Amino acid sequence: SWQHQPHAETYAAYADLFKDVTPEKRLAKIKELVKHNPGDPASAIAVAKAAIDARQYDLARSQLLAAIDRRETVAACQL
């Protein structure tokens, strides 16, 4: 679960559950998910990915910078 071990594959599976909703609604769902482990770099990456899809680039940028600050540079740079 996200609370104990956030991971990109968990994010992908969770986001896939909401593939038929608007990107904005998917972003809201991802924000709810990451509340269970907000300090983990994977949480910042998950929000950044969903924010990019929702075209909320300022939010995406801030989350990517947070991930980089937490030493999650590879995943952040891949976005």
Image (cartoon, rainbow, N blue to C red):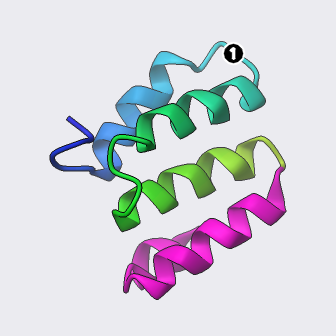
For mark 1, does the 10 Å Cα neighbourhood hold few (<14), some (14 to 19), or many (20 or more) residues?
few
Residue at 17 percent across and 49 percent down: it is 5
Residue at 43 percent across and 71 percent down: it is 75
Q: Is residue 64 left or right of residue 10?
A: right
Residue type at mark 1?
Val
Q: Position of residue 63 (x, y in %)?
A: 61, 66
Q: Position of residue 38 (x, y in %)?
A: 41, 54
Q: Which residue is mark 1?
A: 21
* Secondary element type, mark 1: loop
| Residues drawn in magenta | 56-79
Asked if residue 32 is among those painted magenta in the image, a careful observer would answer no
Residue 56 lies, with reference to residue 40, above or below; the image says above
Residue at 76 percent across and 21 percent down: it is 22
Figure label count: 1
Q: Quadrant of residue 48?
A: bottom right
Q: Position of residue 51 (x, y in %)?
A: 70, 49
Q: Is residue 41 left or right of residue 7?
A: right
